[in-house]
Image (cartoon, helix red, strand yellow):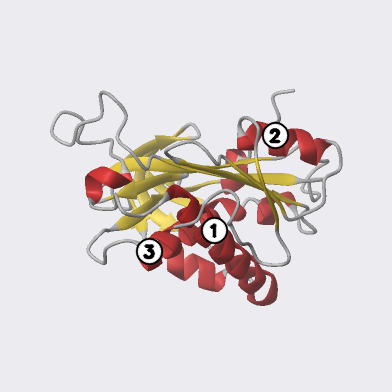
Amino acid sequence: MSTAETLSFPPLLDGHAAAGSPLEEAVSAAARGAEAGLLLYDAVAADVDVALVLVPEVSRRSAAQMIPLAGVAFQNALGALGPSEVAVHLAWDGRIMVNGAECGRVRAVAPSSEGDAAPDWLVLSLSVRATSPEGVDGGKTPDITALDAEGCGDVAPLDLVEAWARHALNWIRRWEEDGAAELHREWTNLAHGIGDPVNIGGVEGTALGLDEDMNLLVKTPEGTRAVPLVAQLEAPTS
């Protein structure tokens, strides 16, 4: 089991325990010009909370593909550390589903950029409930869960931080070298909610899947529409 003092990250990542919110601190550091690879994590919380600074050299639309990539990396990480029977699925809006219930989510924050130009930076955030908070009960709150409620109580949050960082970096390398096709296939195999009714981005209909750019295709009475993934990039709050 890793501790804050023993965490080990690949050479391209610069990992540090955050004093407060990893996402907020990473966004602040990125806005000040932090280099790509800065990784901040909560070393004391009972849950998984980690943020990674990236400096994209691709269009804003392509950079948004880091959101599904981060979800796939978490599935890979938990798959390596947790029981084999635990099922992880990914919702297009960033939610992480464990055994059919929401357990966490992926977010991405980036400053505005002109047109589809590459943003100056992007912060990728992963937060996952590792322990059941008060009020979360598998019988009473079937749509919300935590890792300990799904048989993963022996998986330490910091071990997941380490594993997620390694898998995320590996997927980024593959994405840079080979494009989004492999990520598209992997995410589709883990997709949650395909075939279900959706109302997202002002588009209401039935989720059909993803186009080649990982935008969500929705069947509406007027025809099939694509909800852009880039719309999920959040703006900095300050």
Kindly indicate whether the residue at mark 2 contacts the one at mark 1 (C-beta within 8 angstroms): no
Left or right relative to 85: residue 45: right
Horizontal side of residue 176 vs 203, given as left or right: right
User: Mark 1 or 2 closer to N-term?
Assistant: 2
How far is the residue under mark 1 from the one under mark 3?
A: 11 Å
- For residue 103, side relative to residue 6 (left or right): left
Identity of the residue drawn at 62% across and 37% down: 22
The C terminus, quarter of image = top right
**From this viewpoint, is residue 211 visible?**
no
The answer to which of marks 2 and 3 sits earlier in the sequence is: 2
User: Could you tell me which secondary element the residue under label 2 belongs to?
Assistant: helix
Is residue 116 found left or right of 197 in the rendered image? right
> What residue type is disc 1 on?
Glu
Pointer 3 local density, CA inside 10 Å: few below 14, some 14–19, many at least 20: some
Q: In the rendered image, which residue does mark 2 sit on?
A: 25
- Residue ID at (56%, 50%): 67
Q: Give whichever of 105, 129 is nearer the camera.
A: 129
Expressed as whole percent of the image width and height from the top left, the position of residue 81 reads: 37, 63
Badge 1 crowding class, 10 Å Cα cut-off, few under 14, some 14 to 19, many 20 or more, is some
Indicate which disc residue 81 carries: 3
Q: Nearer the viewer, residue 16 or 235?
A: 16
* Image location (x, y in percent) of residue 68: 52, 54
Measuring 33% from the left and 52% from the top, which residue is drawn there? 192
Which residue in the rendered view is the most extreme toward the bottom?
178
- Mark 1 lies on residue: 162
Callout 2, which amino acid? Glu
Mark 2 to mark 3: distance in Å?
28 Å
Q: Secondary structure at mark 1?
A: helix
